[in-house]
Image: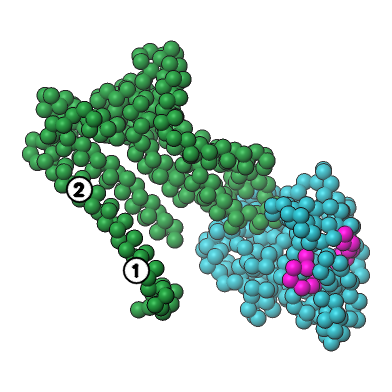
Chain colours: A green, B cyan
Amino acid sequence: MTPAGGAVPTRDGALPRSLLFAAAAVSALAVVAVFAFLLWFSLPVFRGDALASLLSWRWQPLRGQFGILPMLLGSFCLASSALLLAFPLALGVCCFAHGAGPVRAARPLLAAVRFMTSVPTVVYGLVSVFLLVPLIRDAFYGSGFSWLAAALTLSVLVLPTIVLLVDAQFRQVQAEIGPSAAALGFSPVQQLLRLTLPLSRRGLAAALALGFGRAVGDTLIPLMLAGNAARVPHSLLDPLRTLTSHIALVVATDSQDLAYASLFASGLILFVVTAFVHLLLRRWRGQAA
Amino acid sequence: MNSCAIRIEDLSVAFGGRTVIDNLNLEIGQGGPTFLLGRSGSGKTTLLRAINRLNECFPGCVTRGQVSLQLGGDWVDAYAPGTVVETLRRQAGMVFQSPNVLPLSVARNVILPLRTVLNLPADECEARMEQALRDVHLWNEVGDRLAAPAASLSGGQQQRLCLARALALRPEVLLLDEPTASLDFKAARQIEELLVELKTRYTLVVVSHSLSQAHRLAEQVFVLRDGGRVERLEEEVFRDKEALLAVMDELV
C-alpha cells in the first residue's frame, strides 16, 4: 500500500515523516499515560467500602466520608448554567455579525470577542470578586460567593470560545452558499435564518459541546467565586464546589490517604467526561462527512 | 438588434483599488443571447455581476456609473438608492460557472427561494418547481427523487437545476457566467439547447470563452479588452467562424 495520496516516500521526506510520527506518538502516549496515572492512583477508592464512600453525598474527610457527588453535581450545574447564558449570547453575537446587524459593526464586535480570549481567567475572577459578588450580596442575601456569581463570570469566560467556533462555522457555510443565495434575492437576514443557521446545526452542537468542556474544566472561576461549600446547592444564591476547585482545594489542604486518592477519582471523572465530549464530536463529524 | 434591455453607462468597477472595468458603455438588446467574450481577467464576470450588483458581495468593491435594466416595462436604475437590491437580483437571475446547488434536496433547492424570497404558499411553490424542472428538461430525470441531495446529481443536472431555480423566480433577465465551462460535451449541448429555447422569454447575457458557442448561438457579441474597453462585433463577423477568429486574435 502506498502512503496517502499515492506518493512514493523519498529520502528527503523520510526524516520529517519520522519526526511527525514521533511527535504524534508522544502526544498519544502522553494522553494514555495521564489516563493510566489517574486510574492507578484512584484504584484504592474503587475497592470495597471506599467506593461507596466516594459515591456518596458527604465530604467530611475527618469522619472518613469522601463523597464527591456534590462536587460532580456542582460541576454539572455550574457548567450547564454558564452555557445556558453563554450559548444564546454567543449565537446572538454571531447572528449580529453575520447578517442581522450592520456590516460595519461586525468586525469590531468580533475583534472585541477575540480580545476577550486573551484576558487571563484570573482577571475575570478578580473583577467579579470586587464588582459582581458585592452586587449579588446587596441585591439578595448571603456572602455573594455563589453559584450565580460563578455562572455569570464563567459564561463571560466561555463566550469567546463559543463565538469563535460558531463564527468559523458561519463563515464556512456562508462562503459555500453566500453568492448563490444573494444571486437568488435572499436578504442577509433571510440568508442567515433560512440557510446559514439550519446548515450549521452540527457546528452549533460542536460549539455547545466544546463550550461545555471548557466550562467543566475551568478551575479558577469556581474557586474564586462559587463559595466552595462541599454540598448540594438548592438555589442560585447558594455556594457550590466543582470537581476542579475541589481538587485544587484538597491538594492544598489535605494529604490523608483516601481523601488524596479521591482526587484522582475526581480527575478521572473529568478526564472521562472530556474524552466523552470529544468522542461524541468525532462521531458527529464522522456522520457529517 | 432588438430594443434595449440593459443600458450601461460610464461603468467603472474596482476591487481593493485595482480597476477591473474602466468607464465602460454598453447597450444589451432584449432576448439575445448576448455573448460577452474576452480573455481571462478582462472583466467579463465583473461586468455580469455589475448588472445584478453581485460584486457588492465581495470585499473592497467600488462601483461607479449607471446600470439600467428594463424590468416590468419600466427602466430601473440598479444603483439608485431606492432600488431594492434583493428584488433586482431576483428579476435578474444568475447562473454561475460551476453548478452551485445549495446543500439541500433537489426540491428544496427550488422551493426554498420561492418560499423565502417570494413568500409563496406551498402548493404554488410545488407547481412552480415542477414547471421550472420541466422547462430545463430535468423533471423526467429527477421527478422521482426530489428528496435526494442535489449534490448527488451529475454536473450537467446540477447546472440545469441551478437554471431551474433561477427560472422558478420568474426573472426577466438571465445572467449566465460560463454556464457550460465545467460540463462535458453532452451536458454542455443540453444547456446550449436550453438557451435557444429561453431566448424568446428572457433577456440572456452569457459570458463565454467558447467562440464556436458564440458563433452558433449569439444574437449580439461584445468583446472585452484589457482595461475594460469593449468592442461590439457585427453580425457578419461572428456568424463567420474564420472572421470571428481573426477579429478575436486582433482584439485580445
Mark 1 secondary-structure assignment: helix
N-terminal of the two: label 2 or label 1? 1
Q: What segment is highlighted magenta in the picture?
A: B23-43
Q: Quadrant of residue B96?
A: bottom right
> As shown in the figure, which amino acid type bears the numbered disc 2?
Phe
Give the chain of mark 2. Answer: A
Q: Is residue B131 part of the magenta span, yes or no?
A: no
Q: Are marks 2 and 1 on the same chain?
A: yes
Q: Is residue B45 above or below residue B215?
A: above
Towards the viewer: A123 or A184: A123
Image-based side of B60 in relation to B199, left or right = left
Q: Nearer the viewer, residue A34 or A268?
A: A34
| Mark 1 lies on residue | A18
Q: Give the x, y percent position of residue A96.
A: 60, 39
- Residue occupying the point 67% across, 77% down: B188
- Could you tell me which residue is drawn at 87 percent across and 61 percent down? B24
Query: As displayed, is residue B85 above or below residue A224?
Result: below
**Residue A125 placement (x, y as % from top left):** 41, 28
